[in-house]
Image (cartoon, helix red, strand yellow):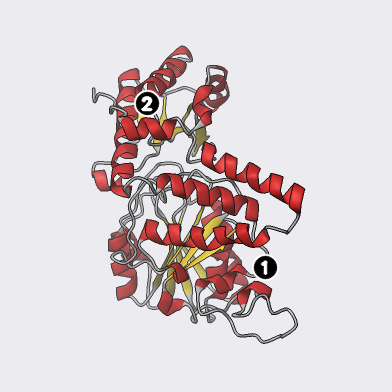
Amino acid sequence: MTPPPTADEHWLDVRQQIPVTDRWAYFDHAGVAPLPAPARDRLKAWADDAAESGDVNWSRWHRAVGNLRNLAAALITAEPDELAVVRNTTEGLSLVAEGYPWRPGDNVVITGGDFPTNVYPWLNLQSRGVEVRPMDVNGGCITADLVRETLDKHTRMVAISWVHFASGWRADLDAIAAVAHDAGALVCVDAIQGLGVLPLDVSQTPVDFLAADGHKWLLGPEGAGLLYVRRPHLDRLRTIGVGWNSVVQPFDYDHIDLVLKPAAARYEGGTYPMAAVVGLEASLGLLGRYPLGEVSARALAVAESIRCRLSDLGAQVVQFERPENRSAIVSFDFAGDDVSRYPRACRDAGVVINHRGGRLRASPHVYTTADDIDRLVEALAALR
């Protein structure tokens, strides 16, 4: 049995800023993450100021938007002007899907069995004469070879999830991008199940577009996310949702001149979800204190420890042979048992897990401790 990783000082420091740990052993970051204290405090401060002063201090809070872009850019080694602040992953993917200059006869390759967020925006293109080609994958295990077998000379986009929401499979983005680009197609990534705990350097991994909510591994509130558009593609997309905030002079309300911002911020359109923005800014500030390589190593080690403990318990755990295909999502079940009843029963024991794709799903974070894992195993054992 692999021993649980030791929570050294800086992970315990993170844990002290996660109030959910006072009550719960929390294993649902692939669903909705608990808010860290810094995000909660920023949200409360914004709400208090909005209630007490209206828009008097609006410009002070608005600075959070630029700071969020900078933090997000640093996270994936992009330029800040390649990042747009959006409300959620769906909005980001839809801006790409609807903005691309499709022609009848074009096709887009997607993953069969993917989360609906990364399916519906592409299916919606069928009314424009775009063929949708789902890859027939087992457990979301998308590979470069499968992409190569599915695309053809009419493929304009390969739309994939970096990490499959149910199985936890992590796709090799470098290999997939190489295959797509060799065929003349672009790559659009739903990164929500990896961004924050897995390293991604877009200066080296040439994905073209990327979208992610902030309310999972980034530990932000619901309502704010990120869209990455590689700079050469900025003018390739038709800008959707154009509003006062899309132009180079957004605060010159008396002068109408449709000159779009020369940055991904042109996709931001109108008013920001400021409460969510300031919360996500605070969460990224917390995670950004630690090198992403260390964050990733810690999260993956915790997940691997859980896999070993569950196997010892008799669970059938989804395993991937190559470490580079593993993520912080642990998918498992118990043969012959109806596992859909487990999440609610586990909550009665103070343990939060979820149920996806016919299996249970445990998704820890860097602050997860050996005691949390013990509580998870004990709760599951009591249900056997």
In the image: residue 332, left or right of residue 268: left
In the image: residue 302, left or right of residue 60: left
Mark-to-mark CA distance, 2 and 1: 42 Å
Answer few, some or many: residues within 10 Å of disc 1's Cα (few below 14, many 20 plus, some between 14 and 19): some
Position of the N terminus by quadrant:
top left
In the image: residue 217, left or right of residue 51: left
In the image: residue 347, left or right of residue 287: right
Q: Which residue is mark 1?
A: 270
Q: For residue 13, which numbered disc appears in the image?
A: none
How far across and down, in percent of the image, does residue 191 sit?
Answer: 44, 55
How far across and down, in percent of the image, does residue 237 sit?
Answer: 52, 78
Query: Residue, x 43% and y 35% (percent of image)?
Result: 363
Front-most of residues 70 and 28: 70
Q: How many marks?
A: 2
Q: Which residue is mark 2?
A: 369
Answer few, some or many: residues within 10 Å of disc 2's Cα (few below 14, many 20 plus, some between 14 and 19): many
| Element type at mark 1 | loop
Query: Residue, x 62% and y 57% (percent of image)?
Result: 61
Query: Residue, x 41% and y 79% (percent of image)?
Result: 232
Query: Residue, x 50% and y 81% (percent of image)?
Result: 235
Tell me, yes or no, if residue 119 can be seen here.
Answer: no
Position of the C terminus by quadrant:
top left
Which badge, 2 or 1, comes first in the chain's sequence?
1
Q: What's under tag 1, amino acid-wise?
A: Gly
Tell me, yes or no, if residue 94 can be seen here.
Answer: yes
Which quadrant of the structure image shows residue 142? bottom left
Q: What's under tag 2, amino acid-wise?
A: Thr
